[in-house]
Image (cartoon, grey):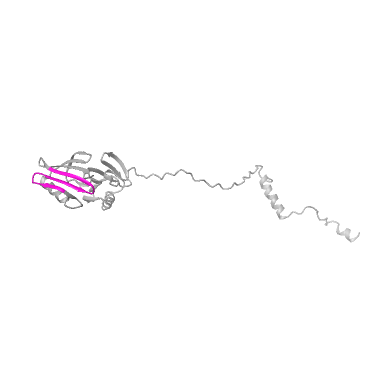
Amino acid sequence: MSAPAARQGAGHRPALRGPKWTGITLACLAVAAILTGCGGSSTTATVITPTAATTATPSTATTAATPSTSSAPFSGPGGVPVYQPSTVIERLPGQLKLISADSVTRVAAYYASTLTGGGWLIVSKAITPDGASFTVYANEQVVTVGVLPKTNGSAVLITIDGLYSLHGIPIYQPSAVLSQAAGSLGFISGESVTQVGAYYASTFSGGGWVVVSKTVTPHSARFTVRKAGQGATVAVFPHGAGSAVVIAHYTLQ
């Protein structure tokens, strides 16, 4: 036997001929097996083709702001600011009652700061650890603000007590309105004619007022004044133990 034949004897088989399995081919087969479930579970895997992300189109509607926990308006009688956050418990003409979870000290400090300046005129102010009270002139009104302690917070009462001026003409205080119409006002005071008359004489002597005529006696007083295109007459006369005042306002031609 020749040498080549001997080399092809037992223990030596010819090399197998066939396709060449490259690394890429094997990887593809492995992926295919996973997708078709070969050699594993018989469940067919679902291939989900990703879609391009969709950009949300903003709505043309304006998103409403998250409402405040407060149910109270931002201003009360006479335009006096309302403490926030708070909840209205009663609303009447010229009166507003509300409660807040904040302490009397904090609410009182808010009003002491807010009503100092900004066009507000504080007539009286009292602040204690147990409460606070403010009387202010606001938008031609006399307004009181009371702050009282309440369980787990505080209560606030804002009330209009009357007018302090009519078209810029001061109303003597203290007084009580008896009648009011367009351009006119009648009120009474416990003070004497002399005292009320002296008040108006002093008021009209400055502040841009022009006194057209003036009559002052122990029993009555009458003024005719002008200011910034406006005119008025103010009459003071006895009423019981005090006095009565009538103001008539008009626009100058």
- Residue 208 lies, in percent from the top left, at 20, 52
Q: Quadrant of residue 231?
A: top left
Task: Specify the principal SS of the magenta part.
Answer: strand
Residue 155 in view in this figure: no
In the image: residue 114, left or right of residue 9: left
What span is colored magenta in the figure?
A: 212-236
Outermost residue toward the bottom in this view: 3
In the image, taking residue 24 as reference, residue 223 lies left or right, namely left
**Of 176 and 211, which appears nearest the observer?**
211
Q: Residue furthest left?
A: 218
Task: Report x, y in % for residue 174.
Answer: 16, 45
Q: Quadrant of the N terminus?
A: bottom right
Q: Residue at x 24, y 43 (%)?
A: 159
**Of all residues shown, which one is farthest toward the right?**
1
State the quadrant of the C terminus. Answer: top left
Please report the residue visible at 66 percent of the width from the left and 46 percent of the height from the top: 35
Percent position (x, y) of residue 143? 23, 45
- Residue 225 pos. (x, y %): 18, 47
Q: Which residue occupies the foreground of this view, 189 or 234?
A: 234
Does 182 sit left or right of 52 as displayed? Answer: left
Q: Residue furthest front?
A: 253
Is 232 part of what is drawn in magenta? yes
